[in-house]
Image (cartoon, rainbow, N blue to C red):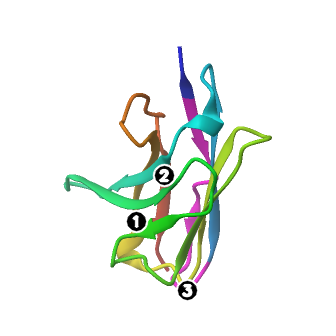
Amino acid sequence: EGRLVESGGDLVQPGGSLRLSCAASGFTFSNYPMRWYRQAPGEGLEWVSRIDSGGADTSYSDSVEGRFTISRDNAKNTLYLQMHALKTEDTAVYFCTTDSQMFWGPGTQVTVSS
């Protein structure tokens, strides 16, 4: 069965950067478009970004466009989210999932605070 494990979350100051990783196993990662979502305290799930199976086509929510970059390394079965110019409103638990939401990881906490 497929498994996803996020990592890289941390406490960072406003304006800082982080790179999240999502390690995939148990399924053919390179066949699947992937997504990042996030959930802020007391809020619902928010879609953040999507990447196609080959990594050529990406899309972002308006709230992160120009600051976040999604990428993937199919040889390493890993999805990434590079985050720059972080804002306090980026504080959330970040999750990776397949395009069809077949598998979810446990999430990684990102806290942006001075």
Tag 2 and tag 1, C-beta contact below 8 Å:
no
Secondary structure found at label 3 = loop
Mark 2, Cα crowd under 10 Å, few <14 / some 14-19 / many 20+, is: many
Magenta residues (range): 4-16
Q: Residue at x 42, y 70 (%)?
A: 60
Viewer-side residue, 59 vs 31: 31
Near-viewer residue (109 or 4): 4
Q: Which mark is residue 91?
A: 1
Q: Position of residue 79 (x, y in %)?
A: 63, 49
Residue under the image location 63 percent in, 27 percent down: 28
Q: Which of the 4 image quarters holds residue 62?
A: bottom left
Amino acid type of disc 2? Answer: Gln
Which residue in the protein does label 2 denote? 109
Residue at 34 percent across and 74 percent down: it is 89
Left or right: 98, with 100 as reference point: right
User: Mark 1 Cα within 10 Å, few/some/many (few <14, many 20+)?
Assistant: many
Mark on residue 19? none
Q: Position of residue 64 (x, y in %)?
A: 42, 76
Q: Secondary structure at mark 1?
A: loop
**Tag 2, which secondary structure?**
strand
Q: Earlier in the sequence, mark 2 or mark 3?
A: 3
User: Is residue 5 found inside the magenta-colored segment of the image?
Assistant: yes
